[in-house]
Image (tube, grey):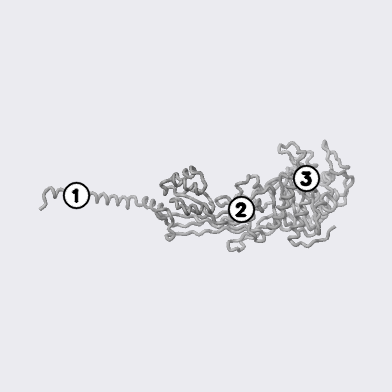
Amino acid sequence: MYSKSHKLRLSSFLLFSIFLLIVLLARLYYIQIVKFDSFSKIALNQQDITINISPQRGVIYDRTLKELAISLKVYSAWANPRLIKDKTRAADRVSDILDLDSSLVLERLNKNKSFVWLKRMISEPELNGLNDSQIKGVYLLAESKRFYPKGKLASHLLGFCGLDGYGLEGVELSYDNFLRGAVGWRYTLQDGRGKEITTMEKELMPTINGRNLILTIDEIIQYIAEEELLQAVDKWKAVSGTIIIMEPSTGKILALANYPTFNPNFFSNTKPRFWRNRAITDCFEPGSTFKIVTASAALEEGLLNLDDKFYCEEGAYKIGKRILHDYHPYGWLTFKEVIVKSSNIGTVKVAREVLGGERLQRYIKRFGFGEKTGIDLPGEIVGIAKDPSQWSGTTLSAIPIGQEIAVTALQLASAVSCIANGGLLIKPRVVGEIRDEDFKVVRSFKPEVIRRLLSEKVAAQMRSILKGVVEKGTGRLAGLNGYTAAGKTGTAQKARLDGKGYFRRKFVASFIGFAPVREPAISVVVILDEPRPVHFGGVVCAPVFKKVAEKILSYLEIRPDETG
């Protein structure tokens, strides 16, 4: 028999047990029913993870399908600070392996986040070091890194990408939507240590890889242009320079070179001013190369013939308070000789006495000066072409010879190509095709004619004039071996940035031309900024045209034509 005290203890224990059971059931009810949603979310946040899958960025090829920009698989280091207990020790170990400041790493590990970057795109030794160390809460993520196998080649045209894979300059920027593709993701589970359980994948959204670009440029032609530009800049101690090679019948850019240049693989080590694509972002007074506009306009309007004569005042011509000079004194010259010998006085007389300001302005706009060419590259400027309402009393004596107007190298390339191809102004391009990851053509770009600018007759007359420039005029050093060539020289004083006149000893030298004359395969623009000690376009730029054109025509297997 149980004693009364024993029964009391047993009853108390039973009541206490019932009370505990009630508390437990209440707690279970609270967890399972009342707080079900919130605790479920916590569990899901701890177990379920969504992992973004980066697409493969499209490859950029030259027109012969040589790779100019590709993507390589690399790894980046990241951490989940919530899983790291001894953050100071982890920071010391990570900083040693990744060559980072330990205080910076510790600052990131102290954040109340489940994801922080430690270092993007780590080297192979760093990758191996992290794999060997097995630091809890520190992980690796596979990413793509843009790589330019040709280094500096065509850097201003290609541009570059940032760490996140977005295009920042060049075609990498202008065609970023095509190249980048679409990010995918997978919804899966992770274990208590934060590692993915690959067999527990719940949902997958595959990536869409980027499209591939086939450029119009040719790697060999680009190399020729860059090498000759570098030699010319070095020889004449120029501040900068540009060469553009265009196919005049299609507007395709075969090469575009600038100096100074940079390596897009290490663009962050270069000052931003070196990234600038000077061919489309810089403008300058063109000097005598602009005489092709004045001459073309006068011929197209039917206002004169090639044999009409102008008196060139023996080299000095007073216009108001200004005296206009020719480098060499001339008397009577035919209109053709005015351009061949690059007479400032003769050209101004054509503009003032024959053409007039209204017609001249109309042809300036028709040639595309004062507006963008529309090339598929970012950063193009319009240059400076004043409205006639802003013209001064001397403007009509300045613009016809390339003063009081500023142009880009690409605008000059389009203008001279118009004369070369028979009178059509064609939109320049650097991308020929877009292809998918199976290399099927998604989009093909055909030549886009903006307008017929000159009649075929006038274009032929201009080709004859410019051929004379090379054979008998200021561009004799541009003459080619085995090929006929045509072109125009230019030498312009640089205008002061404050608008107060011109520098006395700073010039921009230029040459624009094409070859062979009868069926032009290439048009070429050569610009050297502040060449020294000689600054004449016919001396410093015409020989560059000769070297570039001869090498390219030979490479393209263009048959030599009659010379002389």
The boundaries of the magenta stretch are 11-16
* Mark 2 element type: helix
Badge 3 amino acid: Gly
For disc 1, the marked residue is 13
The mark lying in front, picked from 1 and 2, is: 1
Q: Residue shown at 65%/44% (left/top)?
A: 273
Q: Tell me if residue 370 comes above or below residue 562 in the rendering.
A: above
- Residue 12 magenta-highlighted: yes
Badge 1 amino acid: Phe
N-term-proximal mark, 2 vs 3: 2
Can residue 471 be seen from the camera position used here? yes
* Mark 3 element type: helix
Left/right placement of residue 504 relative to residue 206 reads: right
**For residue 559, which quarter of the picture?**
bottom right
For disc 2, the marked residue is 172
Q: Residue 287 carries which label?
A: 3
- Determine whether label 1 and label 2 are within 8 Å by CB: no
- Number of marks present in the image shown: 3
**For residue 349, which quarter of the picture?**
top right
N-term-proximal mark, 1 vs 2: 1
As measured in the structure, the alpha-carbon distance from the residue carrying label 1 to the one carrying label 2 is: 78 Å
